Amino acid sequence: MLSLIRHGQTDWNAAGRMQGSSDIPLNDVGRQQAQDAVELLRGTEWDVIVSSPLQRARETAQIIADGLGLELGRSYDLLIERNYGEGEGLTKAEIDQKWPDVPMYPGLESLDSVVKRGIEALDQVSADYGDKKVIVVCHGTIIRYTLSELAGRDFDHILNGSISTIERLADCWAVRTVNGEPLAWVD
C-alpha cells in the first residue's frame, strides 16, 4: 500500500502562484499541515517515507518521518511537480491575461507527461520497496491527475497535507482514498 501526501503549504500556494518545479520552501502553515498528517497517520503501520526532491516535499517528508519514527528514504525525480514553464510564479489570472485562449503556453508540461511520470514513479517505488507500506510525499497536480487516471474519473483538488491511498493489485493500482476520504464509486 502507498499513501500519497501533498506537501504542506508554501507562500506561493497561499498567494495562488504556480510553483511547479520551482523549489519553494514550506511556510509555517505548511509545517503545521505536515504535523497534522503525522497525527492522521499515527497508529497505522508504515515502513518508509519517500518524496519528490523539491524542498517543500522533502521537508514535509522529514517532519512526518521524524513524527512517526520512520526512515526517510530516497527522493524520486519522477515525483517533481508539473513544470509550469513561463507560468511559474504567476497566478492563474496573470497566466490567462498573458496567454489568453492558449491552452499550452511556453514551457508548460503536458498533463499526459505528468500522468506518465506519476505512474512510472509509483511503479518504481513499488519495485524498490516491494510489499512494504510506503508514504510518498509529492505535489498536488501530479497526485491529482495520476489518481484521476488510475481511478478513471476526475478529481477537483488535492489539499495540502492531505492523504490519498492506493493499493497494488497484481498489475494495476486501485485508488482507495482521495484527500482522506474513501473513494465512492459511481455506477
Image: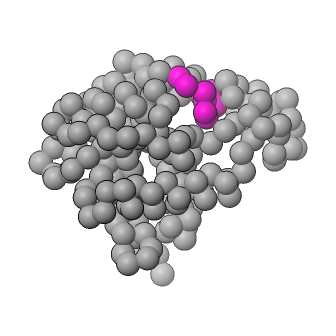
Residue sitting at x 26%, y 64%: 131
Name which quarter of the figure residue 168 lies in.
bottom left
**In the image, is 185 to the left or to the right of 47?**
right
- Residue 12 versus residue 122: which sits nearer the camera? 122
For residue 143, above or below residue 18: below
Extreme bottom residue here? 187
Residue 45 location (% of width, % of height)? 16, 52
Magenta range is 16-24
Residue 128 location (% of width, % of height)? 36, 56
Q: Which quadrant is the N terminus positioned in? A: bottom left
For residue 166, above or below residue 43: below
**In the image, is 96 to the left or to the right of 118?**
right
Residue sitting at x 75%, y 41%: 108
Extreme front residue here? 128
> Do we see residue 162 in this rendering?
no
Is-magenta flag for residue 17? yes
Name which quarter of the figure residue 38 lies in.
top left
Residue 165 location (% of width, % of height)? 35, 58
| Magenta residues, dominant SS class | loop
> Do we see residue 21 in this rendering?
yes
Name which quarter of the figure residue 83 lies in.
top right
Residue sitting at x 21%, y 50%: 47
- Residue 93 versus residue 127: which sits nearer the camera? 127
Is-magenta flag for residue 114? no
